[in-house]
Amino acid sequence: MFDNFIVYFKVISLLCFTFLLTACSKESNDSDITNEKSQALVLLRGLPTKDTLHSIAIVELDPSSTRFGEIFQDYELPNLDEPLHHLYYSPTGRLYATGLDPKCSLMEIKLTRDTQGSPNIQGHKCLETQGQVVGEDIIWHNVADKEYMFVTFMGGGGIDQPDGGSVGVFDAQTNQVIKIIDARKSLVGPNKPFIMYPHGISAYQDRMIISSTAHPDLKTGVGNTITVIDLNTLTAIETITIEDSSPLGLPSSPVEVLFLRPSIVEGVQPGVLVNTMLGFETWFVPYNEQEKLFSNPLKLYDGATNNTGVPLEFYGTKDELFISHGIPGVVKRYHLDQLPKLVPSGPDIKTDAGAHHMIFFTDNAGKDLIAVQNNLLNLGDKSHNDPTDIDFIAKLNAHTVSVHDLANSERIGTINFKQRYGKGIENIEALFGSGFVHHH
Protein backbone atom coordinates (compact mmCIF):
# COMPACT_ATOMS: atom_id res chain seq x y z
CA MET A 1 0.00 0.00 0.00
CA PHE A 2 2.74 2.44 0.94
CA ASP A 3 4.52 1.75 -2.37
CA ASN A 4 1.63 3.64 -4.02
CA PHE A 5 2.04 6.67 -1.73
CA ILE A 6 3.90 8.80 -4.28
CA VAL A 7 1.74 7.73 -7.23
CA TYR A 8 -1.47 8.78 -5.50
CA PHE A 9 -0.12 12.22 -4.74
CA LYS A 10 1.01 12.72 -8.32
CA VAL A 11 -2.57 12.13 -9.41
CA ILE A 12 -3.95 14.52 -6.83
CA SER A 13 -1.42 17.17 -7.79
CA LEU A 14 -2.96 17.34 -11.29
CA LEU A 15 -6.04 18.87 -9.69
CA CYS A 16 -4.09 21.77 -8.22
CA PHE A 17 -4.43 25.29 -9.52
CA THR A 18 -1.69 27.38 -11.16
CA PHE A 19 0.18 29.08 -8.35
CA LEU A 20 1.83 32.47 -8.08
CA LEU A 21 5.48 31.66 -7.41
CA THR A 22 7.24 34.96 -8.05
CA ALA A 23 8.03 37.56 -5.41
CA CYS A 24 6.28 40.90 -5.61
CA SER A 25 6.10 44.09 -3.60
CA LYS A 26 4.52 47.50 -3.51
CA GLU A 27 6.28 50.74 -2.73
CA SER A 28 5.21 53.73 -0.69
CA ASN A 29 6.79 57.03 0.23
CA ASP A 30 7.54 55.94 3.80
CA SER A 31 8.59 52.44 2.74
CA ASP A 32 12.02 52.58 4.36
CA ILE A 33 10.50 52.96 7.83
CA THR A 34 10.61 49.59 9.55
CA ASN A 35 7.83 48.39 11.82
CA GLU A 36 8.64 45.54 14.16
CA LYS A 37 5.04 44.31 14.03
CA SER A 38 5.50 43.46 10.37
CA GLN A 39 8.74 41.54 10.92
CA ALA A 40 8.66 37.79 11.45
CA LEU A 41 10.84 34.89 12.44
CA VAL A 42 11.13 32.17 9.81
CA LEU A 43 12.79 28.78 9.83
CA LEU A 44 14.61 28.17 6.54
CA ARG A 45 15.73 24.88 5.01
CA GLY A 46 18.98 24.93 3.04
CA LEU A 47 18.74 23.19 -0.34
CA PRO A 48 21.70 21.06 -1.52
CA THR A 49 21.54 22.23 -5.12
CA LYS A 50 21.60 25.84 -3.96
CA ASP A 51 24.51 25.27 -1.57
CA THR A 52 22.59 26.95 1.25
CA LEU A 53 22.41 26.21 4.98
CA HIS A 54 19.51 25.74 7.38
CA SER A 55 18.87 28.88 9.40
CA ILE A 56 16.61 31.04 11.56
CA ALA A 57 15.88 34.41 9.99
CA ILE A 58 14.16 37.73 10.66
CA VAL A 59 12.29 38.99 7.58
CA GLU A 60 10.16 42.01 6.63
CA LEU A 61 6.56 41.10 5.68
CA ASP A 62 4.97 44.49 4.95
CA PRO A 63 4.20 44.60 1.20
CA SER A 64 4.05 48.42 1.33
CA SER A 65 7.73 48.57 2.21
CA THR A 66 10.59 48.60 -0.30
CA ARG A 67 12.26 46.21 2.15
CA PHE A 68 9.44 43.67 1.71
CA GLY A 69 10.97 40.21 1.72
CA GLU A 70 14.35 41.43 2.97
CA ILE A 71 16.12 39.27 5.53
CA PHE A 72 17.52 41.44 8.35
CA GLN A 73 19.35 38.57 10.05
CA ASP A 74 20.07 35.03 8.86
CA TYR A 75 21.32 32.95 11.79
CA GLU A 76 22.80 29.83 10.20
CA LEU A 77 22.91 26.33 11.70
CA PRO A 78 25.77 24.64 9.82
CA ASN A 79 25.92 21.60 12.12
CA LEU A 80 22.39 20.41 11.37
CA ASP A 81 21.77 17.91 8.58
CA GLU A 82 18.01 18.49 8.86
CA PRO A 83 16.34 21.83 9.66
CA LEU A 84 14.37 23.12 12.59
CA HIS A 85 10.67 22.56 12.13
CA HIS A 86 8.32 24.65 14.32
CA LEU A 87 8.71 27.77 16.49
CA TYR A 88 6.92 28.24 19.82
CA TYR A 89 6.85 30.83 22.60
CA SER A 90 6.39 29.69 26.19
CA PRO A 91 3.93 31.59 28.41
CA THR A 92 6.94 33.47 29.84
CA GLY A 93 8.21 34.49 26.41
CA ARG A 94 11.02 31.98 25.94
CA LEU A 95 11.50 30.87 22.33
CA TYR A 96 11.72 27.19 21.40
CA ALA A 97 11.96 25.19 18.20
CA THR A 98 11.40 21.55 17.44
CA GLY A 99 13.75 19.93 14.93
CA LEU A 100 13.89 17.15 12.36
CA ASP A 101 17.57 16.36 12.98
CA PRO A 102 18.10 13.64 15.63
CA LYS A 103 21.13 15.65 16.81
CA CYS A 104 18.83 18.53 17.81
CA SER A 105 15.17 17.57 18.09
CA LEU A 106 14.41 20.34 20.59
CA MET A 107 16.09 23.73 20.92
CA GLU A 108 15.83 26.93 22.94
CA ILE A 109 16.69 30.08 20.97
CA LYS A 110 18.02 33.28 22.51
CA LEU A 111 16.12 36.16 20.91
CA THR A 112 16.99 39.56 22.38
CA ARG A 113 17.53 43.17 21.29
CA ASP A 114 20.81 44.74 20.28
CA THR A 115 22.10 48.08 21.58
CA GLN A 116 19.85 49.93 19.10
CA GLY A 117 16.79 48.01 20.28
CA SER A 118 16.53 45.89 17.14
CA PRO A 119 15.62 42.17 17.32
CA ASN A 120 18.65 39.91 17.34
CA ILE A 121 19.12 36.13 17.45
CA GLN A 122 22.09 35.73 19.77
CA GLY A 123 22.40 31.99 20.23
CA HIS A 124 20.77 28.63 20.66
CA LYS A 125 20.99 25.49 22.79
CA CYS A 126 19.99 21.96 21.80
CA LEU A 127 18.11 20.40 24.72
CA GLU A 128 18.44 16.92 26.20
CA THR A 129 15.49 14.71 25.15
CA GLN A 130 16.62 11.33 26.49
CA GLY A 131 16.99 10.01 22.95
CA GLN A 132 13.61 11.14 21.63
CA VAL A 133 13.86 12.35 18.03
CA VAL A 134 11.98 14.31 15.34
CA GLY A 135 10.31 16.93 17.49
CA GLU A 136 6.96 18.27 16.25
CA ASP A 137 4.52 20.23 18.41
CA ILE A 138 4.80 21.87 21.84
CA ILE A 139 2.24 22.97 24.42
CA TRP A 140 2.52 24.31 27.98
CA HIS A 141 -0.11 23.08 30.42
CA ASN A 142 -0.65 23.01 34.18
CA VAL A 143 -0.95 19.66 35.93
CA ALA A 144 -1.73 19.74 39.67
CA ASP A 145 -0.75 23.43 39.77
CA LYS A 146 2.63 22.81 38.15
CA GLU A 147 3.40 23.94 34.63
CA TYR A 148 4.97 21.49 32.18
CA MET A 149 6.17 21.68 28.60
CA PHE A 150 4.85 18.78 26.49
CA VAL A 151 6.54 17.89 23.19
CA THR A 152 5.50 15.32 20.60
CA PHE A 153 8.31 13.30 19.03
CA MET A 154 7.23 11.56 15.83
CA GLY A 155 10.33 9.35 15.87
CA GLY A 156 10.11 8.42 19.55
CA GLY A 157 13.20 6.57 20.69
CA GLY A 158 14.53 6.17 17.15
CA ILE A 159 13.35 6.32 13.55
CA ASP A 160 14.32 2.65 13.21
CA GLN A 161 11.20 1.82 15.25
CA PRO A 162 8.34 1.03 12.82
CA ASP A 163 5.67 1.99 15.37
CA GLY A 164 7.58 4.52 17.44
CA GLY A 165 6.65 7.91 18.82
CA SER A 166 6.49 9.55 22.23
CA VAL A 167 5.52 12.61 24.25
CA GLY A 168 8.23 14.29 26.30
CA VAL A 169 7.25 15.90 29.60
CA PHE A 170 9.66 18.71 30.53
CA ASP A 171 10.02 21.03 33.49
CA ALA A 172 8.85 24.37 32.07
CA GLN A 173 11.53 26.29 33.96
CA THR A 174 14.63 24.10 33.71
CA ASN A 175 13.91 22.21 30.45
CA GLN A 176 14.74 18.96 32.26
CA VAL A 177 12.96 15.77 31.19
CA ILE A 178 10.40 14.68 33.80
CA LYS A 179 9.02 11.68 31.93
CA ILE A 180 8.77 10.11 28.48
CA ILE A 181 5.24 8.95 27.68
CA ASP A 182 5.27 6.12 25.17
CA ALA A 183 3.08 3.13 24.34
CA ARG A 184 4.25 1.31 21.22
CA LYS A 185 1.46 -0.63 19.55
CA SER A 186 3.61 -3.74 19.18
CA LEU A 187 4.41 -3.74 22.91
CA VAL A 188 1.17 -2.79 24.67
CA GLY A 189 -0.83 -5.67 23.22
CA PRO A 190 -4.05 -5.88 21.18
CA ASN A 191 -6.91 -3.46 21.83
CA LYS A 192 -4.82 -1.35 24.20
CA PRO A 193 -4.32 2.43 23.84
CA PHE A 194 -1.14 3.23 21.95
CA ILE A 195 1.00 6.17 20.83
CA MET A 196 2.36 6.12 17.27
CA TYR A 197 3.89 8.90 15.14
CA PRO A 198 2.45 11.65 17.40
CA HIS A 199 2.23 15.08 15.80
CA GLY A 200 -0.62 17.34 16.94
CA ILE A 201 -1.18 17.99 20.65
CA SER A 202 -3.76 19.89 22.68
CA ALA A 203 -5.08 19.75 26.25
CA TYR A 204 -8.01 20.73 28.44
CA GLN A 205 -8.15 20.20 32.21
CA ASP A 206 -6.61 16.75 32.87
CA ARG A 207 -6.94 15.32 29.38
CA MET A 208 -4.45 15.70 26.54
CA ILE A 209 -4.96 14.62 22.92
CA ILE A 210 -2.24 13.65 20.46
CA SER A 211 -2.62 12.60 16.83
CA SER A 212 -1.04 9.72 14.88
CA THR A 213 0.19 11.10 11.56
CA ALA A 214 2.98 9.28 9.70
CA HIS A 215 6.36 7.67 10.30
CA PRO A 216 9.15 10.24 9.87
CA ASP A 217 10.63 8.32 6.93
CA LEU A 218 7.32 8.87 5.04
CA LYS A 219 7.14 5.24 3.92
CA THR A 220 7.02 2.87 6.90
CA GLY A 221 3.52 3.67 8.12
CA VAL A 222 0.61 6.08 8.36
CA GLY A 223 -1.76 6.49 11.32
CA ASN A 224 -5.53 6.98 11.55
CA THR A 225 -6.10 7.67 15.26
CA ILE A 226 -5.90 10.13 18.12
CA THR A 227 -4.85 9.07 21.62
CA VAL A 228 -6.12 10.39 24.95
CA ILE A 229 -3.55 10.88 27.74
CA ASP A 230 -4.57 11.15 31.39
CA LEU A 231 -2.50 14.00 32.80
CA ASN A 232 -2.97 12.76 36.37
CA THR A 233 -0.99 9.62 35.60
CA LEU A 234 0.78 10.73 32.37
CA THR A 235 -0.36 7.57 30.60
CA ALA A 236 -2.32 6.76 27.44
CA ILE A 237 -5.87 5.68 28.30
CA GLU A 238 -7.80 5.61 25.00
CA THR A 239 -7.16 5.49 21.26
CA ILE A 240 -9.92 6.71 18.91
CA THR A 241 -10.07 6.03 15.18
CA ILE A 242 -10.68 9.13 13.03
CA GLU A 243 -11.38 7.90 9.51
CA ASP A 244 -14.10 7.68 6.90
CA SER A 245 -13.42 8.10 3.20
CA SER A 246 -9.98 7.32 1.79
CA PRO A 247 -9.38 9.56 -1.24
CA LEU A 248 -5.80 8.32 -1.62
CA GLY A 249 -6.33 4.74 -0.55
CA LEU A 250 -4.25 5.43 2.57
CA PRO A 251 -4.99 5.80 6.29
CA SER A 252 -6.43 9.19 7.21
CA SER A 253 -3.29 10.57 8.94
CA PRO A 254 -4.71 12.89 11.64
CA VAL A 255 -2.31 15.81 11.87
CA GLU A 256 -3.21 18.87 13.97
CA VAL A 257 -5.71 18.80 16.84
CA LEU A 258 -7.36 21.60 18.79
CA PHE A 259 -9.14 20.92 22.09
CA LEU A 260 -12.11 23.29 21.81
CA ARG A 261 -12.77 24.66 25.29
CA PRO A 262 -14.50 27.56 27.11
CA SER A 263 -11.30 29.63 27.21
CA ILE A 264 -11.52 29.75 23.39
CA VAL A 265 -15.31 30.01 22.99
CA GLU A 266 -17.42 30.91 26.03
CA GLY A 267 -20.02 28.24 26.78
CA VAL A 268 -18.87 25.92 24.02
CA GLN A 269 -19.38 22.17 24.13
CA PRO A 270 -15.82 20.92 24.76
CA GLY A 271 -14.36 18.57 22.22
CA VAL A 272 -11.47 18.01 19.87
CA LEU A 273 -11.17 19.37 16.33
CA VAL A 274 -9.05 17.09 14.14
CA ASN A 275 -7.66 17.61 10.64
CA THR A 276 -6.91 14.40 8.71
CA MET A 277 -4.07 15.15 6.30
CA LEU A 278 -4.67 12.24 3.91
CA GLY A 279 -8.39 11.88 4.63
CA PHE A 280 -8.88 15.53 3.53
CA GLU A 281 -11.39 16.00 6.36
CA THR A 282 -12.04 17.99 9.56
CA TRP A 283 -13.68 16.19 12.49
CA PHE A 284 -15.08 16.98 15.92
CA VAL A 285 -14.95 14.58 18.87
CA PRO A 286 -17.35 15.77 21.62
CA TYR A 287 -16.12 15.57 25.22
CA ASN A 288 -18.25 15.21 28.36
CA GLU A 289 -16.15 16.90 31.02
CA GLN A 290 -18.34 15.66 33.89
CA GLU A 291 -17.99 12.01 32.88
CA LYS A 292 -14.57 12.54 31.25
CA LEU A 293 -15.72 10.60 28.22
CA PHE A 294 -15.41 11.21 24.48
CA SER A 295 -18.31 10.54 22.10
CA ASN A 296 -18.21 9.20 18.56
CA PRO A 297 -16.32 11.44 16.09
CA LEU A 298 -18.43 13.69 13.85
CA LYS A 299 -17.27 14.71 10.38
CA LEU A 300 -17.58 18.48 9.89
CA TYR A 301 -15.92 18.98 6.51
CA ASP A 302 -15.15 16.71 3.55
CA GLY A 303 -12.37 18.05 1.36
CA ALA A 304 -12.74 15.41 -1.34
CA THR A 305 -16.19 16.78 -2.19
CA ASN A 306 -15.08 20.41 -1.78
CA ASN A 307 -11.97 20.27 -3.99
CA THR A 308 -9.48 20.65 -1.13
CA GLY A 309 -6.93 18.27 0.32
CA VAL A 310 -4.22 17.97 2.96
CA PRO A 311 -5.82 20.08 5.72
CA LEU A 312 -3.09 21.01 8.16
CA GLU A 313 -3.26 23.80 10.77
CA PHE A 314 -5.79 25.40 13.12
CA TYR A 315 -5.13 29.05 13.99
CA GLY A 316 -7.40 31.67 15.48
CA THR A 317 -7.91 35.34 16.22
CA LYS A 318 -10.34 36.58 18.84
CA ASP A 319 -13.18 36.28 16.31
CA GLU A 320 -12.25 33.66 13.72
CA LEU A 321 -10.84 30.17 13.24
CA PHE A 322 -8.55 29.60 10.24
CA ILE A 323 -7.79 26.18 8.69
CA SER A 324 -5.06 25.77 6.07
CA HIS A 325 -5.42 23.27 3.19
CA GLY A 326 -2.27 22.34 1.25
CA ILE A 327 -4.28 21.52 -1.89
CA PRO A 328 -4.96 23.69 -3.79
CA GLY A 329 -3.40 26.17 -1.36
CA VAL A 330 -6.20 27.86 0.56
CA VAL A 331 -7.02 29.03 4.08
CA LYS A 332 -10.67 28.78 5.07
CA ARG A 333 -12.05 31.06 7.77
CA TYR A 334 -14.92 30.44 10.20
CA HIS A 335 -16.84 32.26 12.94
CA LEU A 336 -15.21 31.37 16.25
CA ASP A 337 -18.42 31.76 18.25
CA GLN A 338 -20.24 29.24 16.01
CA LEU A 339 -17.83 26.36 16.74
CA PRO A 340 -17.96 23.41 16.55
CA LYS A 341 -20.08 24.26 13.51
CA LEU A 342 -17.89 25.49 10.66
CA VAL A 343 -19.76 28.62 9.59
CA PRO A 344 -17.78 30.68 7.02
CA SER A 345 -16.83 34.15 8.25
CA GLY A 346 -15.34 35.49 5.02
CA PRO A 347 -14.04 34.56 1.57
CA ASP A 348 -11.38 31.88 1.26
CA ILE A 349 -7.79 33.12 1.39
CA LYS A 350 -6.23 31.79 -1.83
CA THR A 351 -2.56 31.13 -1.18
CA ASP A 352 -0.04 28.81 -2.89
CA ALA A 353 0.61 25.08 -2.89
CA GLY A 354 1.19 23.69 0.59
CA ALA A 355 -0.65 26.36 2.62
CA HIS A 356 0.49 25.62 6.16
CA HIS A 357 1.45 27.94 9.06
CA MET A 358 0.29 31.54 9.44
CA ILE A 359 0.61 34.70 11.53
CA PHE A 360 -1.46 37.85 11.89
CA PHE A 361 -0.01 41.37 12.10
CA THR A 362 -0.56 45.02 11.16
CA ASP A 363 1.38 47.00 8.55
CA ASN A 364 2.72 50.56 8.84
CA ALA A 365 -0.68 51.96 7.95
CA GLY A 366 -2.42 49.90 10.64
CA LYS A 367 -4.05 47.47 8.20
CA ASP A 368 -4.71 43.96 9.52
CA LEU A 369 -2.87 41.32 7.48
CA ILE A 370 -2.33 37.57 7.45
CA ALA A 371 0.87 35.93 6.21
CA VAL A 372 0.73 32.27 5.15
CA GLN A 373 3.74 29.97 4.75
CA ASN A 374 3.14 27.80 1.69
CA ASN A 375 5.19 24.63 2.02
CA LEU A 376 4.52 21.18 3.39
CA LEU A 377 8.04 19.86 4.06
CA ASN A 378 10.37 21.75 1.72
CA LEU A 379 12.07 18.63 0.40
CA GLY A 380 13.25 20.10 -2.87
CA ASP A 381 12.41 20.16 -6.55
CA LYS A 382 13.22 17.28 -8.90
CA SER A 383 13.43 19.62 -11.90
CA HIS A 384 16.48 21.12 -10.21
CA ASN A 385 17.96 17.68 -9.52
CA ASP A 386 17.62 18.13 -5.79
CA PRO A 387 18.60 14.87 -4.04
CA THR A 388 16.28 15.57 -1.12
CA ASP A 389 13.25 15.63 -3.39
CA ILE A 390 10.17 13.45 -2.99
CA ASP A 391 7.93 14.06 -5.98
CA PHE A 392 4.53 14.29 -4.30
CA ILE A 393 5.83 16.63 -1.61
CA ALA A 394 7.46 18.87 -4.21
CA LYS A 395 3.95 19.41 -5.59
CA LEU A 396 3.01 20.88 -2.22
CA ASN A 397 5.99 23.20 -1.96
CA ALA A 398 5.51 26.69 -3.35
CA HIS A 399 8.45 27.96 -1.24
CA THR A 400 6.51 31.18 -0.62
CA VAL A 401 4.96 33.38 2.02
CA SER A 402 1.83 35.08 0.71
CA VAL A 403 0.47 38.17 2.49
CA HIS A 404 -3.24 38.98 2.40
CA ASP A 405 -5.58 41.73 3.53
CA LEU A 406 -7.52 40.21 6.42
CA ALA A 407 -10.57 42.36 5.66
CA ASN A 408 -11.23 40.83 2.23
CA SER A 409 -8.75 37.91 1.90
CA GLU A 410 -7.09 39.52 -1.15
CA ARG A 411 -3.41 38.83 -1.79
CA ILE A 412 -1.22 41.93 -1.65
CA GLY A 413 2.27 40.43 -1.75
CA THR A 414 4.34 37.26 -2.17
CA ILE A 415 7.91 36.33 -1.19
CA ASN A 416 9.46 33.35 -2.98
CA PHE A 417 12.25 32.17 -0.69
CA LYS A 418 13.66 29.62 -3.11
CA GLN A 419 14.01 32.12 -5.92
CA ARG A 420 15.33 34.92 -3.73
CA TYR A 421 17.45 33.07 -1.15
CA GLY A 422 17.83 29.50 -2.41
CA LYS A 423 16.00 28.10 0.61
CA GLY A 424 12.69 26.53 1.53
CA ILE A 425 10.61 27.92 4.38
CA GLU A 426 9.63 25.57 7.22
CA ASN A 427 7.74 27.81 9.63
CA ILE A 428 6.73 31.40 10.35
CA GLU A 429 6.20 33.16 13.68
CA ALA A 430 5.97 36.70 15.05
CA LEU A 431 8.75 38.46 16.96
CA PHE A 432 8.67 38.38 20.77
CA GLY A 433 5.30 36.63 21.01
CA SER A 434 2.86 34.48 19.08
CA GLY A 435 1.28 36.04 16.03
CA PHE A 436 -2.08 34.46 16.77
CA VAL A 437 -4.48 34.01 19.68
CA HIS A 438 -5.58 30.37 19.46
CA HIS A 439 -3.55 27.41 18.24
CA HIS A 440 -3.18 24.29 20.35
Image: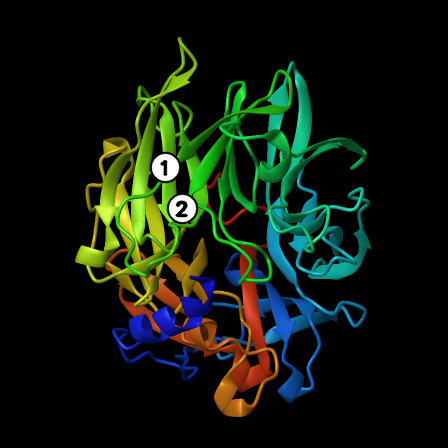
Asked which quadrant contains residue 51, the reply is bottom right
Tell me the residue that label 1 is attached to. 273
**Helix, strand, or loop for circle 1?**
strand
Tell me which label, 1 or 2, sits earlier in the chain.
Answer: 1
**Helix, strand, or loop for circle 2?**
strand
Identify the residue at horizontal 63%, vertical 80% (top origin): 47
> Badge 2 local density, few (<14 within 10 Å), some, or many (20+)?
many
Residue 59 sits above or below residue 433 on the image: below
Task: Please state the horizontal and vertical placement of residue 68, each as a whole percent of the image.
Answer: 49, 75
Three-letter code, disc 2? Phe
User: Any mark on residue 359, and which?
Assistant: none
Q: Residue furthest front?
A: 190
Tell me the residue that label 2 is attached to. 314
Asked which quadrant contains residue 414, the reply is bottom left
Left or right relative to 324: residue 410: left
Residue 255 appearing in the image: yes
* Foreground: disc 1 or disc 2: 1
Identify the residue at horizontal 21%, vertical 62% (top origin): 307
Mark 1 and mark 2 residues within 8 Å of each other at the beta carbon: yes
Three-letter code, disc 1? Leu
The one of 188 and 122 positioned closer to us in this rendering: 188
Task: Please state the horizontal and vertical placement of residue 110, each as a whole percent of the image.
Answer: 76, 52
Asked which quadrant contains residue 151, the reply is top right
